[in-house]
Amino acid sequence: MKQNSGGTDSPWKTGELTTQLPALDADLQADVCIVGGGISGMTTAYLLAREGRSVVVLDDGPIGGGETGRTTAHLSNAFDDRYYEAERLFGERGSRLIAESHTAAIDKIEEIVRDEQLDCDFDRLDGYLFVPPDDSRDILDREIAATRRAGLHDVEWVDRAPINDFDTGPCLRFPRQGQFHPLKYIEGLVRATLRRNGCVYGHTHADEIRGGRLACITTSNGHIVTAAAVVVATNSAVNDSIILSTRESKYRSYVIGACVPRGSVTKALYWDTADPYHYVRIQCGDDEDILIVGGEDERVGEHDDGDERFAELYRWTRKRFPMIGRIEFCWSGHIVEPTDTVAFIGRMPLSEENIYVVTGDSGQGMTHGTIAGILLTDLIQGRQNEWTDLYNPSRLRSISTVDFLNESLNVTAHYTDWLTGGEVSSTEEIKPDEGCIVRRGLTKLAAYRDEQGGLHERQAVCTHLGCVVAWNSTEQSWDCPCHGSRFDKLGHVINGPANRNLVH
Protein backbone atom coordinates (compact mmCIF):
# COMPACT_ATOMS: atom_id res chain seq x y z
CA MET A 1 0.00 0.00 0.00
CA LYS A 2 2.90 2.31 -0.71
CA GLN A 3 2.04 5.78 -1.94
CA ASN A 4 3.63 7.55 -4.86
CA SER A 5 6.66 9.74 -4.26
CA GLY A 6 5.72 13.27 -3.26
CA GLY A 7 2.26 12.38 -1.98
CA THR A 8 0.50 13.09 -5.29
CA ASP A 9 -1.64 9.95 -5.20
CA SER A 10 -4.89 11.58 -4.03
CA PRO A 11 -8.33 12.02 -5.62
CA TRP A 12 -7.74 15.76 -6.02
CA LYS A 13 -4.87 15.12 -8.44
CA THR A 14 -6.83 12.95 -10.90
CA GLY A 15 -8.29 15.81 -12.91
CA GLU A 16 -6.02 18.21 -14.77
CA LEU A 17 -6.33 21.83 -13.69
CA THR A 18 -6.53 24.10 -16.68
CA THR A 19 -4.93 27.22 -15.18
CA GLN A 20 -1.15 27.14 -15.45
CA LEU A 21 0.85 29.63 -13.39
CA PRO A 22 3.82 31.38 -15.01
CA ALA A 23 7.04 31.95 -13.10
CA LEU A 24 7.86 35.51 -12.09
CA ASP A 25 10.06 37.02 -14.84
CA ALA A 26 10.34 40.70 -13.82
CA ASP A 27 10.53 42.98 -10.80
CA LEU A 28 7.11 44.09 -9.52
CA GLN A 29 5.53 46.46 -7.03
CA ALA A 30 2.16 45.90 -5.36
CA ASP A 31 0.12 46.86 -2.34
CA VAL A 32 0.48 43.35 -0.87
CA CYS A 33 2.76 40.42 -1.70
CA ILE A 34 1.62 37.01 -0.51
CA VAL A 35 4.17 34.20 -0.25
CA GLY A 36 2.34 30.88 -0.56
CA GLY A 37 -0.54 30.03 -2.87
CA GLY A 38 -2.51 27.57 -0.74
CA ILE A 39 -5.88 28.14 0.90
CA SER A 40 -4.73 30.91 3.27
CA GLY A 41 -2.64 32.77 0.70
CA MET A 42 -5.19 32.61 -2.12
CA THR A 43 -8.14 33.48 0.13
CA THR A 44 -6.26 36.55 1.39
CA ALA A 45 -5.29 37.52 -2.16
CA TYR A 46 -8.83 37.12 -3.46
CA LEU A 47 -10.44 39.13 -0.64
CA LEU A 48 -7.89 41.95 -0.95
CA ALA A 49 -8.24 42.05 -4.73
CA ARG A 50 -12.01 42.19 -4.32
CA GLU A 51 -11.49 45.37 -2.27
CA GLY A 52 -9.38 46.92 -5.01
CA ARG A 53 -5.89 46.28 -3.60
CA SER A 54 -3.12 45.22 -5.98
CA VAL A 55 -1.78 41.81 -4.96
CA VAL A 56 1.06 39.54 -6.06
CA VAL A 57 1.10 35.88 -5.02
CA LEU A 58 4.34 33.86 -5.19
CA ASP A 59 4.19 30.07 -4.89
CA ASP A 60 6.94 27.45 -5.12
CA GLY A 61 4.98 25.17 -7.42
CA PRO A 62 1.71 24.69 -9.32
CA ILE A 63 -1.78 25.45 -8.01
CA GLY A 64 -2.37 23.50 -4.82
CA GLY A 65 1.04 21.88 -5.05
CA GLY A 66 1.61 22.11 -1.30
CA GLU A 67 -0.51 21.00 1.64
CA THR A 68 -3.81 22.25 0.18
CA GLY A 69 -3.47 19.43 -2.37
CA ARG A 70 -3.15 16.90 0.47
CA THR A 71 -6.08 17.90 2.65
CA THR A 72 -9.19 15.77 3.05
CA ALA A 73 -11.12 19.06 2.89
CA HIS A 74 -13.40 18.79 5.90
CA LEU A 75 -15.06 22.16 6.49
CA SER A 76 -16.05 22.07 10.11
CA ASN A 77 -16.77 24.19 13.16
CA ALA A 78 -16.36 21.07 15.33
CA PHE A 79 -13.06 22.11 16.89
CA ASP A 80 -10.68 19.15 16.64
CA ASP A 81 -8.96 19.97 19.94
CA ARG A 82 -12.39 20.13 21.64
CA TYR A 83 -14.25 23.17 22.92
CA TYR A 84 -13.89 22.23 26.58
CA GLU A 85 -10.10 22.38 26.10
CA ALA A 86 -10.35 25.70 24.25
CA GLU A 87 -12.47 27.05 27.09
CA ARG A 88 -9.86 25.96 29.63
CA LEU A 89 -7.10 27.74 27.70
CA PHE A 90 -8.90 30.82 26.37
CA GLY A 91 -11.99 31.18 28.52
CA GLU A 92 -15.61 31.12 27.47
CA ARG A 93 -15.23 34.18 25.23
CA GLY A 94 -12.24 32.65 23.45
CA SER A 95 -14.15 29.42 22.88
CA ARG A 96 -17.05 31.41 21.46
CA LEU A 97 -14.73 33.25 19.08
CA ILE A 98 -13.28 29.94 17.87
CA ALA A 99 -16.76 28.65 17.09
CA GLU A 100 -17.76 31.95 15.49
CA SER A 101 -14.66 32.16 13.28
CA HIS A 102 -14.82 28.57 11.98
CA THR A 103 -18.54 28.96 11.30
CA ALA A 104 -17.86 32.23 9.48
CA ALA A 105 -15.15 30.50 7.42
CA ILE A 106 -17.58 27.88 6.11
CA ASP A 107 -20.09 30.62 5.35
CA LYS A 108 -17.40 32.63 3.53
CA ILE A 109 -16.45 29.64 1.38
CA GLU A 110 -20.11 29.12 0.50
CA GLU A 111 -20.42 32.82 -0.36
CA ILE A 112 -17.36 32.74 -2.63
CA VAL A 113 -18.57 29.57 -4.36
CA ARG A 114 -21.92 31.26 -5.01
CA ASP A 115 -20.58 34.67 -6.04
CA GLU A 116 -17.88 33.31 -8.34
CA GLN A 117 -20.00 30.35 -9.53
CA LEU A 118 -17.24 27.88 -8.71
CA ASP A 119 -17.70 24.26 -9.75
CA CYS A 120 -15.88 22.67 -6.81
CA ASP A 121 -18.30 20.08 -5.38
CA PHE A 122 -19.16 22.28 -2.40
CA ASP A 123 -21.82 20.71 -0.21
CA ARG A 124 -23.39 21.29 3.19
CA LEU A 125 -23.76 18.17 5.31
CA ASP A 126 -23.84 16.91 8.90
CA GLY A 127 -20.82 15.92 10.97
CA TYR A 128 -20.82 13.19 13.63
CA LEU A 129 -18.43 12.92 16.59
CA PHE A 130 -18.29 9.55 18.36
CA VAL A 131 -16.09 7.68 20.82
CA PRO A 132 -14.24 4.41 20.07
CA PRO A 133 -16.02 1.17 21.08
CA ASP A 134 -16.20 0.63 24.86
CA ASP A 135 -14.89 4.14 25.62
CA SER A 136 -16.72 6.37 28.09
CA ARG A 137 -19.04 9.00 26.63
CA ASP A 138 -17.82 11.50 29.21
CA ILE A 139 -15.78 13.34 26.58
CA LEU A 140 -18.96 13.88 24.56
CA ASP A 141 -20.90 15.04 27.62
CA ARG A 142 -18.22 17.64 28.30
CA GLU A 143 -18.02 18.65 24.65
CA ILE A 144 -21.71 19.26 24.05
CA ALA A 145 -21.90 21.42 27.17
CA ALA A 146 -18.88 23.42 25.97
CA THR A 147 -20.23 23.79 22.41
CA ARG A 148 -23.44 25.30 23.75
CA ARG A 149 -21.52 27.76 25.90
CA ALA A 150 -19.58 28.60 22.72
CA GLY A 151 -22.83 29.44 20.94
CA LEU A 152 -23.27 26.26 18.88
CA HIS A 153 -26.80 25.61 20.18
CA ASP A 154 -27.79 23.33 17.30
CA VAL A 155 -25.28 20.59 18.20
CA GLU A 156 -27.34 17.65 19.47
CA TRP A 157 -27.23 14.07 20.69
CA VAL A 158 -28.31 11.36 18.23
CA ASP A 159 -28.61 7.62 18.82
CA ARG A 160 -25.84 6.74 16.37
CA ALA A 161 -24.01 8.02 13.32
CA PRO A 162 -25.60 6.92 10.00
CA ILE A 163 -23.04 4.16 9.32
CA ASN A 164 -24.90 0.98 8.35
CA ASP A 165 -22.38 -1.66 9.41
CA PHE A 166 -20.95 -0.05 12.52
CA ASP A 167 -22.92 1.11 15.54
CA THR A 168 -21.10 4.12 16.94
CA GLY A 169 -23.51 4.38 19.84
CA PRO A 170 -24.82 7.80 20.94
CA CYS A 171 -22.84 10.60 19.32
CA LEU A 172 -22.94 14.33 18.65
CA ARG A 173 -24.36 15.71 15.41
CA PHE A 174 -22.90 18.99 14.13
CA PRO A 175 -25.23 20.39 11.44
CA ARG A 176 -24.27 22.57 8.46
CA GLN A 177 -20.70 21.44 8.08
CA GLY A 178 -19.19 21.35 4.59
CA GLN A 179 -16.87 19.73 2.09
CA PHE A 180 -15.50 20.57 -1.35
CA HIS A 181 -12.85 19.68 -3.93
CA PRO A 182 -9.90 21.73 -2.64
CA LEU A 183 -7.95 22.11 -5.89
CA LYS A 184 -11.00 23.09 -7.93
CA TYR A 185 -11.75 25.68 -5.26
CA ILE A 186 -8.18 27.03 -5.24
CA GLU A 187 -8.17 27.22 -9.03
CA GLY A 188 -11.42 29.19 -8.82
CA LEU A 189 -9.80 31.64 -6.37
CA VAL A 190 -6.82 32.03 -8.71
CA ARG A 191 -9.06 32.82 -11.68
CA ALA A 192 -11.19 35.23 -9.66
CA THR A 193 -8.05 37.01 -8.40
CA LEU A 194 -6.62 37.28 -11.92
CA ARG A 195 -9.90 38.77 -13.15
CA ARG A 196 -9.44 41.52 -10.58
CA ASN A 197 -5.95 42.30 -11.89
CA GLY A 198 -4.13 40.31 -9.23
CA CYS A 199 -0.90 38.56 -10.22
CA VAL A 200 -0.32 34.90 -9.31
CA TYR A 201 3.03 33.22 -10.05
CA GLY A 202 4.08 29.60 -9.62
CA HIS A 203 7.49 27.90 -9.55
CA THR A 204 8.86 31.02 -7.86
CA HIS A 205 10.73 30.56 -4.58
CA ALA A 206 10.98 33.47 -2.15
CA ASP A 207 14.58 33.41 -0.95
CA GLU A 208 14.43 36.43 1.35
CA ILE A 209 11.59 38.37 2.99
CA ARG A 210 12.31 41.76 4.55
CA GLY A 211 10.00 44.33 6.06
CA GLY A 212 10.47 48.06 6.38
CA ARG A 213 8.83 51.10 4.84
CA LEU A 214 8.36 48.85 1.83
CA ALA A 215 8.56 45.09 2.22
CA CYS A 216 11.03 43.46 -0.15
CA ILE A 217 10.82 39.86 -1.36
CA THR A 218 13.79 38.51 -3.32
CA THR A 219 13.14 35.39 -5.39
CA SER A 220 15.48 32.57 -6.35
CA ASN A 221 15.55 33.74 -9.96
CA GLY A 222 16.81 37.16 -8.89
CA HIS A 223 13.62 39.20 -9.27
CA ILE A 224 12.29 41.46 -6.52
CA VAL A 225 8.76 42.25 -5.40
CA THR A 226 8.24 45.35 -3.26
CA ALA A 227 4.99 45.91 -1.40
CA ALA A 228 3.43 47.91 1.40
CA ALA A 229 2.77 44.61 3.22
CA VAL A 230 3.74 40.97 2.90
CA VAL A 231 1.85 37.87 4.07
CA VAL A 232 3.84 34.69 4.73
CA ALA A 233 1.38 31.85 4.11
CA THR A 234 3.70 28.88 3.67
CA ASN A 235 2.16 26.38 6.15
CA SER A 236 5.25 26.70 8.39
CA ALA A 237 6.60 30.24 8.43
CA VAL A 238 9.76 30.30 6.30
CA ASN A 239 10.86 33.67 7.70
CA ASP A 240 10.82 32.37 11.29
CA SER A 241 13.97 31.06 12.92
CA ILE A 242 12.68 30.18 16.36
CA ILE A 243 9.74 32.31 17.60
CA LEU A 244 6.85 30.32 16.13
CA SER A 245 8.56 27.04 15.23
CA THR A 246 9.14 26.31 18.93
CA ARG A 247 5.43 26.84 19.61
CA GLU A 248 4.33 24.23 17.09
CA SER A 249 4.54 20.46 16.68
CA LYS A 250 4.73 18.93 13.20
CA TYR A 251 2.92 15.71 12.30
CA ARG A 252 2.28 13.52 9.26
CA SER A 253 -1.35 12.46 8.92
CA TYR A 254 -2.09 9.44 6.72
CA VAL A 255 -5.03 9.01 4.35
CA ILE A 256 -6.47 6.23 2.20
CA GLY A 257 -9.17 6.49 -0.45
CA ALA A 258 -11.17 3.26 -0.85
CA CYS A 259 -13.72 2.50 -3.56
CA VAL A 260 -17.23 1.77 -2.25
CA PRO A 261 -20.50 1.14 -4.09
CA ARG A 262 -22.24 4.37 -5.00
CA GLY A 263 -24.57 5.49 -2.19
CA SER A 264 -23.44 2.75 0.23
CA VAL A 265 -22.10 5.28 2.78
CA THR A 266 -24.23 8.20 3.92
CA LYS A 267 -22.66 11.46 2.80
CA ALA A 268 -21.48 13.12 6.02
CA LEU A 269 -18.33 13.96 7.95
CA TYR A 270 -17.33 11.44 10.63
CA TRP A 271 -14.79 11.86 13.43
CA ASP A 272 -13.88 9.71 16.42
CA THR A 273 -12.14 10.75 19.64
CA ALA A 274 -9.32 8.20 19.52
CA ASP A 275 -5.71 9.29 19.98
CA PRO A 276 -4.72 9.68 17.21
CA TYR A 277 -8.25 10.33 15.98
CA HIS A 278 -9.78 9.28 12.65
CA TYR A 279 -11.73 11.37 10.15
CA VAL A 280 -13.93 10.15 7.30
CA ARG A 281 -15.86 11.57 4.35
CA ILE A 282 -17.23 10.55 0.95
CA GLN A 283 -16.21 11.93 -2.44
CA CYS A 284 -18.91 11.01 -4.95
CA GLY A 285 -17.89 9.60 -8.32
CA ASP A 286 -19.67 8.64 -11.52
CA ASP A 287 -19.72 4.86 -11.07
CA GLU A 288 -18.59 4.46 -7.47
CA ASP A 289 -17.75 6.62 -4.50
CA ILE A 290 -14.41 7.12 -2.76
CA LEU A 291 -14.41 6.70 1.02
CA ILE A 292 -11.65 9.00 2.30
CA VAL A 293 -10.30 7.96 5.72
CA GLY A 294 -7.50 9.73 7.57
CA GLY A 295 -5.65 9.35 10.84
CA GLU A 296 -2.69 7.51 12.42
CA ASP A 297 -0.85 10.83 12.91
CA GLU A 298 2.79 10.74 14.01
CA ARG A 299 5.55 13.26 14.57
CA VAL A 300 7.57 14.27 11.53
CA GLY A 301 10.96 12.56 11.30
CA GLU A 302 10.65 10.25 14.29
CA HIS A 303 9.55 6.98 12.64
CA ASP A 304 9.95 5.56 9.15
CA ASP A 305 6.83 3.41 9.26
CA GLY A 306 4.39 4.91 6.77
CA ASP A 307 3.43 1.54 5.28
CA GLU A 308 2.47 0.27 8.73
CA ARG A 309 0.39 3.40 9.32
CA PHE A 310 -1.48 2.86 6.05
CA ALA A 311 -2.05 -0.81 6.95
CA GLU A 312 -3.47 0.12 10.36
CA LEU A 313 -5.73 2.69 8.71
CA TYR A 314 -6.98 0.01 6.33
CA ARG A 315 -7.74 -2.36 9.24
CA TRP A 316 -9.67 0.37 11.07
CA THR A 317 -11.65 1.17 7.93
CA ARG A 318 -12.43 -2.45 6.97
CA LYS A 319 -13.89 -3.11 10.42
CA ARG A 320 -16.32 -0.18 10.18
CA PHE A 321 -16.97 -0.09 6.44
CA PRO A 322 -16.77 -3.74 5.29
CA MET A 323 -18.05 -2.86 1.82
CA ILE A 324 -14.79 -1.17 0.82
CA GLY A 325 -13.14 -2.43 -2.33
CA ARG A 326 -9.74 -1.62 -3.74
CA ILE A 327 -7.60 1.12 -2.21
CA GLU A 328 -7.43 3.68 -4.99
CA PHE A 329 -5.40 6.39 -3.20
CA CYS A 330 -2.84 6.65 -0.40
CA TRP A 331 -1.18 9.87 0.69
CA SER A 332 -0.11 11.85 3.73
CA GLY A 333 -0.21 15.50 4.76
CA HIS A 334 1.81 17.88 6.92
CA ILE A 335 -0.06 18.96 10.06
CA VAL A 336 1.21 21.96 12.04
CA GLU A 337 -0.15 21.80 15.59
CA PRO A 338 0.13 24.95 17.77
CA THR A 339 0.94 24.10 21.37
CA ASP A 340 -2.17 25.93 22.60
CA THR A 341 -4.55 24.58 19.88
CA VAL A 342 -5.28 27.85 17.99
CA ALA A 343 -3.63 28.99 14.74
CA PHE A 344 -1.20 31.92 14.57
CA ILE A 345 -2.66 34.62 12.31
CA GLY A 346 -1.53 38.25 12.38
CA ARG A 347 1.62 40.34 12.58
CA MET A 348 4.87 38.39 12.69
CA PRO A 349 6.38 38.50 16.20
CA LEU A 350 9.55 40.59 16.64
CA SER A 351 9.37 41.77 13.04
CA GLU A 352 8.40 44.88 11.13
CA GLU A 353 4.73 45.78 11.39
CA ASN A 354 4.06 45.20 7.69
CA ILE A 355 4.96 41.49 7.82
CA TYR A 356 2.02 39.17 8.51
CA VAL A 357 2.00 35.42 9.02
CA VAL A 358 -0.40 32.49 9.13
CA THR A 359 0.66 29.09 10.48
CA GLY A 360 -0.48 26.46 12.97
CA ASP A 361 -3.48 25.33 10.95
CA SER A 362 -3.79 22.10 12.94
CA GLY A 363 -6.14 19.55 11.35
CA GLN A 364 -8.52 22.26 10.16
CA GLY A 365 -6.48 23.93 7.48
CA MET A 366 -9.36 24.78 5.15
CA THR A 367 -11.29 26.76 7.76
CA HIS A 368 -8.18 28.16 9.48
CA GLY A 369 -6.92 29.26 6.05
CA THR A 370 -10.21 31.01 5.35
CA ILE A 371 -10.20 32.62 8.80
CA ALA A 372 -6.73 33.92 7.89
CA GLY A 373 -8.05 35.46 4.68
CA ILE A 374 -10.82 37.27 6.55
CA LEU A 375 -8.66 38.43 9.48
CA LEU A 376 -5.56 39.45 7.50
CA THR A 377 -7.69 41.41 5.03
CA ASP A 378 -9.18 43.35 7.94
CA LEU A 379 -5.76 43.98 9.52
CA ILE A 380 -4.19 45.14 6.25
CA GLN A 381 -7.21 47.33 5.50
CA GLY A 382 -7.00 48.91 8.96
CA ARG A 383 -10.29 47.49 10.26
CA GLN A 384 -11.02 46.18 13.74
CA ASN A 385 -11.65 42.44 14.08
CA GLU A 386 -12.55 40.82 17.38
CA TRP A 387 -10.63 37.67 16.43
CA THR A 388 -7.30 39.57 16.44
CA ASP A 389 -6.22 38.85 20.02
CA LEU A 390 -7.30 35.19 19.89
CA TYR A 391 -5.14 34.41 16.86
CA ASN A 392 -2.32 36.86 17.69
CA PRO A 393 1.04 35.14 16.90
CA SER A 394 2.64 37.01 19.82
CA ARG A 395 0.23 35.69 22.43
CA LEU A 396 1.88 34.42 25.61
CA ARG A 397 -0.53 31.53 26.11
CA SER A 398 1.41 29.51 23.50
CA ILE A 399 4.55 29.45 25.67
CA SER A 400 2.88 28.60 28.96
CA THR A 401 1.37 25.19 28.20
CA VAL A 402 2.54 21.70 29.10
CA ASP A 403 2.61 20.90 25.37
CA PHE A 404 5.11 23.73 24.81
CA LEU A 405 7.42 22.37 27.50
CA ASN A 406 7.13 18.82 26.16
CA GLU A 407 7.84 20.02 22.62
CA SER A 408 10.94 21.89 23.81
CA LEU A 409 12.25 18.76 25.55
CA ASN A 410 11.53 16.66 22.47
CA VAL A 411 13.49 19.03 20.24
CA THR A 412 16.44 19.16 22.62
CA ALA A 413 16.62 15.36 22.72
CA HIS A 414 16.99 15.16 18.94
CA TYR A 415 20.20 17.21 18.91
CA THR A 416 21.92 14.13 20.39
CA ASP A 417 21.50 12.51 16.95
CA TRP A 418 24.84 14.16 16.14
CA LEU A 419 26.51 11.68 18.53
CA THR A 420 25.24 8.50 16.90
CA GLY A 421 26.75 6.54 14.04
CA GLY A 422 25.43 6.20 10.53
CA GLU A 423 22.63 3.84 9.50
CA VAL A 424 25.00 1.99 7.14
CA SER A 425 28.76 1.63 7.25
CA SER A 426 29.17 2.35 3.55
CA THR A 427 27.12 3.96 0.79
CA GLU A 428 27.54 0.69 -1.13
CA GLU A 429 24.87 -0.76 1.16
CA ILE A 430 22.23 1.74 -0.03
CA LYS A 431 19.83 0.14 -2.50
CA PRO A 432 18.37 1.95 -5.54
CA ASP A 433 15.58 4.42 -4.66
CA GLU A 434 16.54 4.44 -0.98
CA GLY A 435 18.14 6.94 1.37
CA CYS A 436 20.30 6.50 4.46
CA ILE A 437 22.26 8.63 6.92
CA VAL A 438 25.99 8.00 6.58
CA ARG A 439 28.69 9.16 8.98
CA ARG A 440 31.89 10.36 7.35
CA GLY A 441 34.34 11.51 10.01
CA LEU A 442 32.68 14.29 12.00
CA THR A 443 30.07 14.82 9.29
CA LYS A 444 26.71 13.17 8.71
CA LEU A 445 25.49 12.85 5.13
CA ALA A 446 22.02 12.33 3.69
CA ALA A 447 22.77 9.85 0.89
CA TYR A 448 20.18 8.83 -1.72
CA ARG A 449 20.75 6.32 -4.51
CA ASP A 450 18.49 6.86 -7.52
CA GLU A 451 16.87 4.12 -9.59
CA GLN A 452 19.75 4.21 -12.09
CA GLY A 453 22.29 3.65 -9.31
CA GLY A 454 23.57 7.22 -9.08
CA LEU A 455 24.47 8.43 -5.58
CA HIS A 456 23.38 11.88 -4.36
CA GLU A 457 24.91 13.20 -1.14
CA ARG A 458 23.99 16.26 0.90
CA GLN A 459 24.92 17.29 4.41
CA ALA A 460 22.30 15.81 6.73
CA VAL A 461 21.91 19.14 8.52
CA CYS A 462 18.54 20.87 8.45
CA THR A 463 19.09 24.40 7.17
CA HIS A 464 16.70 25.77 9.79
CA LEU A 465 18.43 25.15 13.12
CA GLY A 466 20.89 22.35 12.46
CA CYS A 467 19.14 19.12 13.48
CA VAL A 468 20.00 15.87 11.71
CA VAL A 469 17.34 14.90 9.16
CA ALA A 470 15.87 11.40 8.79
CA TRP A 471 14.85 9.41 5.70
CA ASN A 472 11.11 8.98 5.09
CA SER A 473 10.81 6.01 2.73
CA THR A 474 7.05 6.44 2.22
CA GLU A 475 7.30 10.06 1.07
CA GLN A 476 10.88 9.66 -0.20
CA SER A 477 11.92 12.77 1.65
CA TRP A 478 14.40 13.92 4.28
CA ASP A 479 12.45 15.05 7.35
CA CYS A 480 13.69 17.07 10.32
CA PRO A 481 12.43 15.70 13.68
CA CYS A 482 13.09 18.98 15.50
CA HIS A 483 10.89 21.57 13.77
CA GLY A 484 9.35 19.59 10.91
CA SER A 485 11.22 20.95 7.88
CA ARG A 486 11.19 18.56 4.94
CA PHE A 487 13.39 18.16 1.86
CA ASP A 488 12.89 15.99 -1.21
CA LYS A 489 15.14 13.03 -1.93
CA LEU A 490 17.69 15.29 -3.66
CA GLY A 491 17.70 17.78 -0.77
CA HIS A 492 15.43 20.52 -2.16
CA VAL A 493 13.30 22.14 0.56
CA ILE A 494 9.58 21.33 0.40
CA ASN A 495 8.33 22.31 3.89
CA GLY A 496 9.40 25.09 6.24
CA PRO A 497 10.48 26.54 8.52
CA ALA A 498 13.67 25.82 6.56
CA ASN A 499 13.83 27.94 3.41
CA ARG A 500 17.09 26.67 1.88
CA ASN A 501 18.08 23.34 0.37
CA LEU A 502 20.33 20.85 2.13
CA VAL A 503 23.96 21.81 1.51
CA HIS A 504 26.17 19.80 -0.86
Image (cartoon, helix red, strand yellow):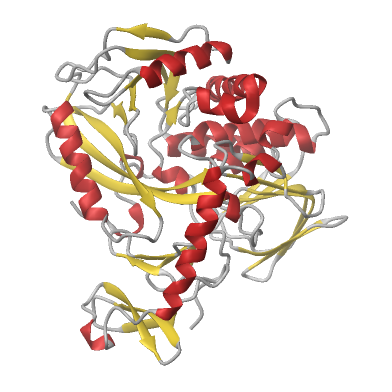
- Residue 50: image quadrant is top right
Where is residue 293 drawn, in percent x and y? 28, 35
Of residues 155 and 405, the one nearer the viewer is 405
x 26%, y 26%: residue: 132
x 81%, y 54%: residue: 352
x 74%, y 25%: residue: 386
Q: Is 247 on the left or on the right of 2, as rendered?
A: right
Of residues 74 and 483, the one nearer the viewer is 483
Where is residue 491 drawn, in percent x and y? 44, 72
Where is residue 120 drawn, in percent x and y? 43, 29
Residue projecting furthest to the right: 213
- Tell me: residue 453, above or below residue 481: below
Where is residue 268 drawn, in percent x and y? 33, 19
- Residue 101: image quadrant is top right
- Tell me: residue 55, above or below residue 3: above
Residue projecting furthest to the bottom: 441
x 40%, y 82%: residue: 445
Residue 183 in view in this figure: yes
Q: Count the marks.
A: 0
Q: Is 291 on the left or on the right of 369, as rendered?
A: left
Residue 17 in view in this figure: no
